[in-house]
Image (cartoon, rainbow, N blue to C red):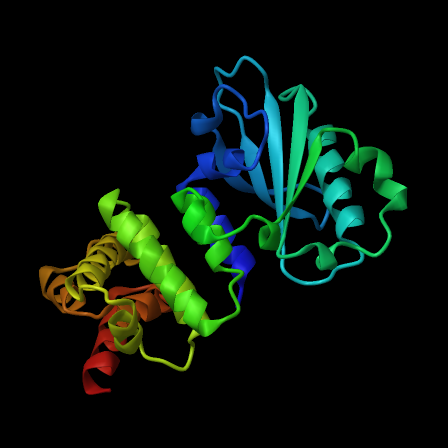
Amino acid sequence: MRRDSIFYKLFKQFPGLLFELVDEPPPEAQNYQFESVEVKETAFRIDGVFLPPANAVSKTVFFAEVQFQKDEDLYHRFFSELFLFLYRNSIRYDDWFGVIIFASGSLEPSSSSIHRALLSSGQVKRVYLDELGDLRQQPLGLGLMLLTNVTSETEAVEGARFLLELARQQSEQAIIDLVTTIIVYKFSKLSREEIQTMLGLNLEEPRAIREAKEEEARSLILRLLNRRVGAVPEQLQRQIQVLSLEQLEALGDALLDFSTLADLEGWLQGEVSG
C-alpha cells in the first residue's frame, strides 16, 4: 500500500493539515501551497514542499517527509534535498522547517549522529503515528493519517466508519473519498461494492463522485483532443460522452499518439467493437 502517496494527496487537498503537527505554525498556515518540486540539475524531487503565500510576513518554507519503511539513507537524502532547494531559491525564502512523519519510531535510521545538530535544532520535528493515540481522539485530518497506519482489519473498518460519519457531519466529501481509497488499498481483494457495503456507505455518494470525475475527465480530454487533432465533430463528441471513466482514462493515454481525427475515429471504433 502506497501510504505516502495517500498522505501527499491529503496534503494537496488540505495543506493546512501539516501545521496541526507543528507546535508553532506560521500565521498564514491556511494559505500555504503544497507542491512536488524538482530541483534543477539534479535527480532530486522533493514530494512534500509547503510554499508560503506571497504576502506572508515570514517567508518560511516547510518540508514534509512520510516514511513507512526502513531507510538508512533517509536523513542524508532529506537534508541534501532540503538544502539544495534552499540554495536554488535563496532569495525567495528566509527560513525553513522540516516535518518527518514515521509510522513508528522503529523506522528511524539506525544512526543519526551525523545529523544530530539538525535533528535537535528546533527546525525539525519527528512525528510517530503509533504514538499519537486513538484516531477517534484526533481532528479529522489527523485521524485519516492514523487510519493509514492501522494493521488490524477490524480496527481499520471501525476507524473508517467513525471517520466517515465525522466527515459526513462536516460535509467533507474529499475526506469520504480518501477514507474509501485507504480501505480499498487495505482490502485489495474485495470489490469496491463490497467495501462500500462493509463501511456502510450510501451507494449514491460514490456514484456522484464517479460521475463528477467522469465529467471532469471528458472535459479535459475534449480540450486535449482539440489541441491535438483539431475541432472534434459533434458525432464523435457524442461517442465520447458515453465512455466510462476507465475508457476515458485509456483515451487520455492513447490520444498522446493521435495526429489526425482518423486516429480518434479508429480508437472509438475499436472500443465499440471490443
Answer yes or no: is residue 256 visible. no
Q: Position of residue 257 (x, y in %)?
A: 40, 67
Q: Residue at x 42, y 45 (%)?
A: 141
Q: Position of residue 238 (x, y in %)?
A: 11, 65
Please say if 198 is above or below 50.
Answer: below
189 or 167: nearer the viewer: 167
Q: Is residue 14 left or right of residue 235?
A: right
Q: Residue at x 53, y 64 (%)?
A: 2
The answer to which quarter of the image holds residue 206 is: bottom left
Q: Is residue 76 left or right of residue 104?
A: right
Residue reaching furthest top?
57
Q: Residue at x 19, y 70 (%)?
A: 243
Q: Position of residue 207 (x, y in %)?
A: 18, 64
Residue reaching furthest right?
114
226 or 32: nearer the viewer: 32
Answer yes or no: is residue 161 visible. yes
Q: Residue at x 62, y 57 (%)?
A: 103
Give the mark count.
0
The answer to which quarter of the image holds residue 140 is: top left
Please say if 201 is above or below 187.
Answer: above
Figure quadrant of the C terminus = bottom left
161 or 251: nearer the viewer: 161
Q: Position of residue 47 (x, y in %)?
A: 59, 47
